[in-house]
Image: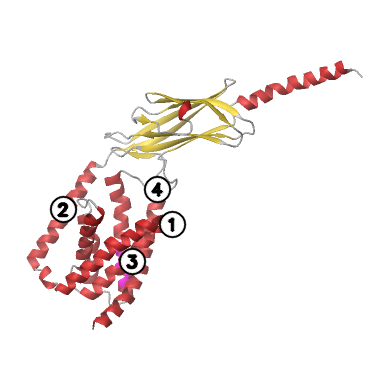
């Protein structure tokens, strides 16, 4: 048997296959690169959007090997100079070197179908004059010299300073107007001791018991967690309206609720106080428009709960979040939460109506 001929044929086949094997193992053609910023619950927060003067935000750079062979690559990540960069401790910490706003990650051996993740943190600037587009630049290089480049654009929004200051000013003005109205028309004199005790007890239930319940179990329901708070608060508001039956009942309830939250939970109410009075003022105005209907019908109770839910959640997601916390929620998520608040208000209003009637009959 001629082994020399077989060896020669085998050598030719091996020589033909070897370049493709080396290429598959070392090329970056199958490497996909993605950047996720902010690195929070995807879909909940607006992607690729940071607010100036906000807190540090996480970013995630993912290198995915979409091939079947292991790829060994090195990567260079260039972060915009406008965003000071820090690198948290992670699995690849020993392979990451930092030079200013440039990171080098080497080597990364990524098996087929798997991914390697680099996490970073960036700090938005304190202030910028106008909306600014910035670019992350990532380059991946394989052992055979092949390389791929990826750019990812984000938007940095100026801090809404005038909105922030305007919010505080309007909040304080609303409080001042309420105080003047109370003194001018002697509204507090209309409330009996029983009325004030009733409002205090209901506010304590909302601000302590149900807020604790919501904070404890909110995550179990995911985006529907808000129903754990909107339903009972709307029910308590309707009960307060039905039992106290005085002008300004809703405003007084939410004022006491916020004072309780400030004491128990340490809430800073400088910005919020006037706006919480606003959601109560809307309900009190509706009571007046319905000719003194203090939740005497189920429809009215549901309207009051729905209005309170809409006002409170719309203010939070479209005013308080970007103004106070520099967080931009995704529009679909914001409107989903507003819709759930309306739904919770409708349910809570109906429940509150039934409870209020029973409580009123027991008192009488």
Q: Nearer the viewer, residue 58 or 145?
A: 58
Q: Which mark is residue 232?
A: 3
* 198 left or right, relative to 306: left
**Labels 3 and 4: the sequence-earlier one:** 3
Mark 1–mark 4 distance (CA, rounded to whole Å): 21 Å
Q: Which residue does the numbered mark 2 point to in the structure image?
A: 172
Residue annotated with mark 4:
330
Q: Secondary structure at mark 1?
A: helix
Residue highlighted by disc 1: 220
Image marks 1 and 4: residues in contact by CB distance under 8 Å: no
Q: Residue 275: give x, y in percent of width and height.
A: 23, 56
122 or 217: nearer the eye? 217
Farthest residue toward the left? 184
Does the magenta-highlighted stretch encompass residue 304? yes
The answer to which quarter of the image holds residue 177 is bottom left
Q: How much space separates mark 2 and mark 3, taking CA atoms?
A: 28 Å
- Span highlighted in magenta in the image: 301-308
The span from disc 3 to disc 4 (Cα, nearest Å) is: 26 Å
């Amino acid at each position: 048997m001629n082994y020399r001929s077989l060896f020669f044929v085998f050598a030719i086949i091996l020589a033909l296959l070897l370049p493709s094997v080396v290429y598959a193992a070392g090329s970056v053609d199958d490497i996909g690169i993605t950047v996720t910023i902010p690195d929070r619950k995807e879909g909940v927060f607006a992607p690729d959007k940071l607010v100036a003067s906000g807190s540090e935000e996480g970013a995630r750079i993912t290198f995915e090997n979409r091939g079947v062979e292991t790829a060994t690559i090195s990567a260079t990540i260039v972060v915009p100079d406008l965003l000071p960069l820090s690198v948290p401790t992670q699995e690849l910490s020993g392979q990451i070197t930092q030079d200013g706003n440039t990171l080098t990650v080497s080597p990364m051996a990524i098996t087929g179908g798997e991914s390697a993740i680099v996490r970073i943190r960036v700090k938005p600037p304190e202030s910028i004059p106008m909306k600014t587009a910035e670019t992350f630049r990532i380059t991946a290089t394989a052992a055979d010299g092949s390389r791929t480049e990826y750019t990812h654009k984000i938007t940095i929004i100026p801090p809404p300073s005038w909105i922030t200051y305007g919010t505080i000013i309007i909040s304080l003005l609303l409080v001042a107007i309420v105080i003047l109205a109370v003194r001018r028309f002697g509204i507090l004199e209309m409330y009996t001791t029983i009325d004030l005790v009733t409002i205090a007890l209901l506010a304590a239930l909302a601000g302590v018991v149900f807020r604790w319940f919501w904070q404890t179990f909110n995550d179990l329901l995911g985006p529907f967690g808000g129903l754990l708070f909107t339903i009972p608060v709307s029910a308590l508001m309707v009960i307060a309206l039905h039992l106290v039956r005085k002008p300004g009942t809703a405003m007084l309830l939410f004022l006491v609720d916020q004072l309780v939250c400030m004491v128990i939970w340490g809430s800073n109410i400088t910005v919020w106080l006037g706006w919480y009075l606003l959601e109560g003022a809307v309900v009190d105005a509706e009571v007046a428009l319905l000719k003194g209907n203090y939740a005497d019908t189920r429809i009215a109770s549901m309207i009051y709960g729905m209005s309170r839910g809409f006002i409170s959640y719309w203010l939070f997601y479209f005013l308080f979040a970007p103004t106070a916390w520099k967080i931009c929620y995704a529009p679909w998520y914001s409107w989903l939460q507003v819709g759930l608040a309306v739904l919770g208000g409708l349910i809570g209003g109906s429940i509150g109506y039934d409870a209020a009637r029973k409580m009123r009959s027991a008192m009488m």
